[in-house]
Amino acid sequence: MYKIILFAILFFNFFMASAKDFVGKLSASAASSKLATLEINAKRVTTSFGEFLVIEDTVLSGLIKNKLSDDLFEYIEPNYSYHVDVNDTLPVLDPMFSRQWGLRNTGKNVEQSLLRGKKGMDIDALRAWTITTGKKSVKIAIIDTGVDYTHPDLLSNMWVNEEEKNGLMGVDDDENGYIDDIHGYNFVNNSGDPQDDYGHGTHCAGVIGASHDTIGISGVMAQVSLVAIKFLNQEGVGSLENALKSIQYAIDIGADIMSNSWGGFDESAALAEAIRAAETAGIVFVVAAGNSMSNNDKKPVWPSNYAMSNVISVGAMNGQGGRSYFSNFGEKSVHIFAPGSNILSTYKTGGYYLSSGTSMATPFVAGMVGLLLSHQAKLNPQEVRDRLIDTAEKSFKLDKSVAGGRANAYRLLSDTR
Ligand code: CA
């Protein structure tokens, strides 16, 4: 009687499952003669936890009909199928990804450091990428030394001004006041060619948006439009005049974010006006806190210290999860920390380079904000900054900041507070 009930349950399961095969665990008392017959039409799986047969449904129904299966098996179940647990396409891991501790710190991949890295002291990029890897519609202006827009790792994520690309040489086809500005503009020599003759801007660009493919590194964003705006010359120096023009250009072309890895100790009323104009236009202004080991609350750095709601000041974190020794800080004036020591990224003339600075931490945050705007386009700069701060991973080592911790891309996207 017991066995009849058992079979009824088995049959019920058979109809519930659409699997073609079944997996039966052989009972200890399974007769060898029966097995010999059966195994003609079954695959045997030998494990340390038992002997199993993978059998087709027609074979199994024959066994049940002939009342053989109850002596043979402890249990039978469908040959279930399982799938990988991802919400999105799997990210492509570039060949140099393993060296990018800022994206995934394994504790062993922090280079040129006397101390071993600390696992997990990173922006949690892999988890973030299960939510989004970015969008081409998000425009990030890199206001810097230019960008090597021919770099194989950056080419596909460069912003393209289609009217200029398809227009005439020497003509301002889109009538925005700038001739041949296909990937951005060069305010150092007033040309449409923002090629990087220093390397710094290319490094920042790679942190934000090096393509996810089979070459080089991965950017924080796999898809983005990088706008190259050059106002810093081949020695890394630029004028207020050209900074103003750069910000105006970024506003005009509809940038979502400006990434600013530069600064100085001179407060400018005009620069404040430019940033306020960006704020009015709803553009996030991410800026480096500075590398003078000082407290920005007491000794302000500009444009980092401007108080507009769109300004996000970024300090640098090392691979041990502490403040980079060179990084500025400030409980009121530096909003958050991000990876900034020994960062591998793209460099001029198609190269790669390890570099340190709040300059490197800044594009990490610009890229994270880019991910957030890819995920939730309608947030205004104030909301973006609040969320970045509220979702930070707190650490006593990074307490000299508004967030009191490091930026985490996954927590930012998932709004984990
Ligand atoms: Ca133009």
Image (cartoon, grey):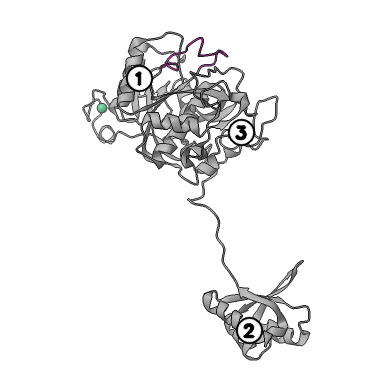
Q: Which residue is rendered at x = 40% and y = 32% of the image? A: 383
Q: Which residue is rendered at x = 57% and y = 41% of the image? A: 95
Of mark 3 and mark 1, the one earlier in the sequence is 3
- CA gap, disc 2 to disc 1? 77 Å
Q: Which residue is rendered at x = 60% and y = 28% of the image? A: 395
Of mark 2 and mark 3, the one earlier in the sequence is 2
- In this view, the residue in front, 311 or 171, is 311
Q: Residue furthest top?
A: 266
Inspect the image, locate mark 2, and give the three-letter code of the amino acid beneath it.
Ile
The answer to whether residue 352 shows anywhere in this view is yes
Where residue 143 appears, x then y in whole percent? 40, 22
Q: Which residue is mark 2?
A: 5
Q: In the image, which disc is placed on residue 121?
A: 3
Mark 3 is surrounded, within 10 Å at the Cα level, by few (under 14), some (14 to 19) or many (20 or more) other residues, namely many
Inspect the image, locate mark 1, and give the three-letter code of the amino acid beneath it.
Ile
Label 2 beta carbon less than 8 Å to ligand 1: no
Q: Which residue is mark 1?
A: 275
Q: Which residues are magenta?
A: 290-306
Residue 44 magenta: no
Inspect the image, locate mark 3, and give the three-letter code of the amino acid beneath it.
Met
Quadrant in the rendering for residue 184: top left
Label 1 beta carbon less than 8 Å to ligand 1: no
Q: Main secondary structure of the magenta part?
A: loop
User: If the image is split into quadrants, where does the N terminus sit?
Assistant: bottom right
Where residue 293 appears, x then y in whole percent? 57, 14
Tag 1 secondary structure: helix
- In this view, the residue in front, 174 or 396, is 396
